[in-house]
Image (tube, helix red, strand yellow):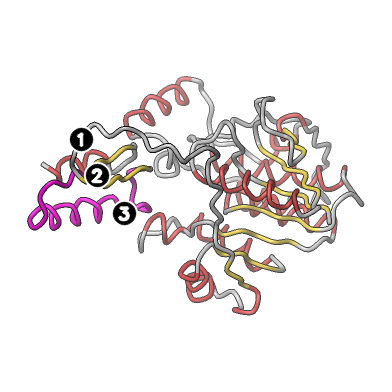
Amino acid sequence: MRVLMFGWEFPPHIAGGLGTACYGMTRGLARNGVDVTFIVPHAYGDEDQRFTHVVNASDVEAMYGSTGSGADDILEKMSFIHIDSNMVPYISPEEYESYHEQYVKSGRKTWSTTDAWKQRYTFSGKYGANLMEEVARYAVVAAQVAKDLEGQFDVIHAHDWLTYYAGIAAKRVSGKPLVVHMHATEYDRSGENVNTQVYAIERAGMHAADRVIAVSNLTRNIVINRYGVPAERVVTVHNAVRFAQNCGTTPERGVDDKIVTFLGRITYQKGPDYFVEAAAKVLKRVPGVRFVMAGSGDMMNHVIRRVA
């Protein structure tokens, strides 16, 4: 079995859990005799390629005319989409403000379909102000990769909404079955206040797929009920855990208190407010417990105020 896999992150340069999950999957697939070619928007050159062949999308020359690429209608849909504020899940508001100022000073503006057909596009591979632009152009490159690797893969695997259009384009070009992996839906990230453009991409990707993988039964139910994907096409595959080697030594504790830790992005999806509320209830009844939060995110200041 040969898999053409599209992701947005890959260790060791990761911003969140998506890259770690993809890395773990490639390890597991390799051990089961599956050959994986992993396409990433921006490769740094020192990725662990023992279990997969990593292709840098920024190095791919996409030689297209105006039609027949497999991504034409995607570009038409995406050409007017431009996110300037809420699609930066891995940096703080303060960091984003600095990032956006630099972006504005650079003089760049929203792009049109005409400048999407250049031979090569250098992806940042980040979650910045031109994220939607990169998502659309990634689909163009994906179609080219599928053409270049014709006959060298059996199935396409795309991770999260960022790569769904890429998966669709590759499927159109190659005719190979498409599996999309839903690690988190827009409802997980935003509650009921979903970004309609992201929702549309998620829905299009899952309806174009031959199989949808959800990381939990909760996610599977959301995919079926909120996105209208037929239940027989959605399967749950839980994330695995790879235990660290030589983890038998217990580290020396500096305090006698019981310690409860929150480690992750301090953002809606991770439920940091629930952690704080639970801590307050526990501390009213149980002495000698210390709650520690480690991370950053757009809810950082809100959580600090609530703790105070």
For this view, does 244 lie left or right of residue 278? right
> Which residue is labeled 1 in the image?
255
Q: Are marks 3 and 2 in contact (CB under 8 Å)?
A: no
Residue 105 position, x and y percent, is 45, 20
Check disc 1: other Cα within 10 Å, few if <14, some if 14-19, many if 20+. few
Which structural element holds mark 3?
loop
Q: Which residues are magenta?
A: 266-291
Most foreground residue, 55 or 216 = 216
| Mark 3 to mark 1 CA distance (whole Å) | 26 Å
Residue 288 position, x and y percent, is 13, 46
Most foreground residue, 211 or 171 = 211
Residue found farthest to the front? 249
Q: Magenta span has 79?
A: no
Per the rendering, the mark at residue 271 is 3
**N-term-proximal mark, 3 vs 1:** 1
Check disc 2: other Cα within 10 Å, few if <14, some if 14-19, many if 20+. few
Can you tell which quarter of the image residue 58 is in? top right
Question: Tag 1: residue type?
Answer: Val
Residue found farthest to the left? 284
Question: Tag 3: residue type?
Answer: Gly
